[in-house]
Image: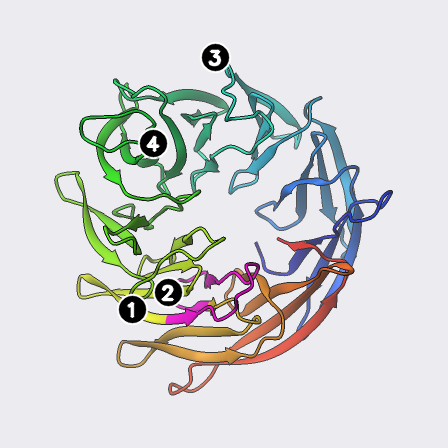
Amino acid sequence: PDGRYLVSQHPVSHTGQVPCLSIWRRETRSLHRASLCCLDHPLVDYDMAFSADSRRLLVVSEEGNLQIWQLQAEGSWHLSLTKRLCRQPVCTAKFSPDAHWLALKVGTRLLMFGETASHAWQEYCDLRWMHAQAFFFPASIPPQAMEFSADSQHFLFVNNGDASVFERCNTDWQTHNIRPDALPSLSFYKEGKLSPMAHWLALILRCQADLPQVPNNCYILELWQRHNERPTWRFSSKMALTITELSCPMAFSPDERQLALPARMDNGNLYVSVLSLTPDGNWRPAFALQLRPGFRTRPLFHGIYSIGFSAQGRYLAATGSVGVQLWQYQAGAWTPAAWRENQSPDVDATPTFAFSPDGCHCALSGGDGGSVSLHGPVPGGRYQSKMQVPGGESLRRMLFSPDGTCLLLLGGYDTVSGYLGRASLLHLVPAADTEPCDRAATSLAVTEAGAGN
């Protein structure tokens, strides 16, 4: 959280190799490895978290162990805790934003652990599925949704086609099962998204039976609203969706008044549909935003990959197989602000974007060799490119430092020798009004690093 440290995981590609983490300290013009942390088992989905004060690193292994490293006075990191949380392999783990709570999916159970005042961790919730496990939802696959709200008070869990929201009162977690009064047969929830402060819940319902109002095998978007009295979650509205993708990324705006998700036109073209919350509390389609005219799904691609709002909700970005599009909200409408086309035929060349913490700048990569462009506001209310960074290898991830002064580029993969990670750290320096952002770049070869956090 203080932007001083970066964590990367070493891939376990050889038999007998010990899984490890590297903790890198960010210095003025370089990255220095502060500690090498050996794990007892590989991590779960690379899941890890720093404490709010940036002095502890928390990780969860596939075997259900929680390990915590503590920052020492001289700058090194020492292992301070190893605790066995469960006796079964962990499928998915999720830390809360404040890093005080941890949710584990273990087989057909959801376990919730919390940190007490004495820095000890104990179990507070054990949810078991009481009905038979459907054959198309094996217990070993990750859940369809597993996320905390921004205040760490609510937790959404969509698994095995069912949806549940957990609400915390002190250390007591209450379970609210989400289920409409008349659920069509052979239907299940396949996606879910909580609004930032958990006032709204968006769910994608997959319908496999004929309904009078919708065609067979279609999707329905359901909106649920949270209330202070029981029932806590109440159904608000629904609408049919014409999407056929394997996933349906969704994003609420920070003020919880807009919801963006992919949709498909009658001619097959994909677009981003933006719903707006009306003053009377209803949701209605307000904007249809195309990544580019005539955008269709390429073979082996899955249409729109990701959607996200900036911190202040003034900008919206979406990635697809053809590239990444950025929109700006002004004068009551969304207008195109920047576009990066994906010119690479490689399926691993995935376009990506990253918003700065203040929401003013956005980094875009079209997936074409790792080149990056940085966009931001300029005098006169315009939004334009401020910096171009030539590439050379496919980017896998981009991260802004919490203070917004650095941009980290993570990429590189060698199919012969396995992972070959490279981290490039760009120092962003304000310049004159005509060119408000300049950069000084330093690169670090991390041949053993497989992922960053």
Name the residue that disc number 1 marks.
Answer: 336
* Residue type for callout 3: His
Closer to the chain start, of discs 4 and 3, is: 3
Closer to the chain start, of discs 4 and 2, is: 4
Residue 315 coordinates in the image, percent (x, y): 33, 62
Closer to the chain start, of discs 1 and 3, is: 3
Closer to the chain start, of discs 4 and 1, is: 4
Closer to the chain start, of discs 1 and 2, is: 2
Residue 232 coordinates in the image, percent (x, y): 30, 23
Find residue 122 and report its image quarter. top right
Image vertical order of residue 191 relative to residue 444, above or below = above
**Magenta residues (range):** 339-363
Please tell me which residue is depicted at 58% across the width and 73% down the height of the picture: 426
Name the residue that disc number 2 marks.
Answer: 325
Q: Are marks 4 and 3 in contact (CB under 8 Å)?
A: no
In the image, residue 357 lies in the stretch drawn in magenta: yes
Q: Secondary structure at mark 3?
A: loop
Please tell me which residue is depicted at 59% across the width and 34% down the height of the picture: 92
At label 4, counting other C-alpha atoms closer than 10 Å, the crowd grade (few under 14, some 14-19, many 20 or more) is many
In the image, residue 96 lies in the stretch drawn in magenta: no
Mark 1 vs mark 2, CA separation in Å: 7 Å
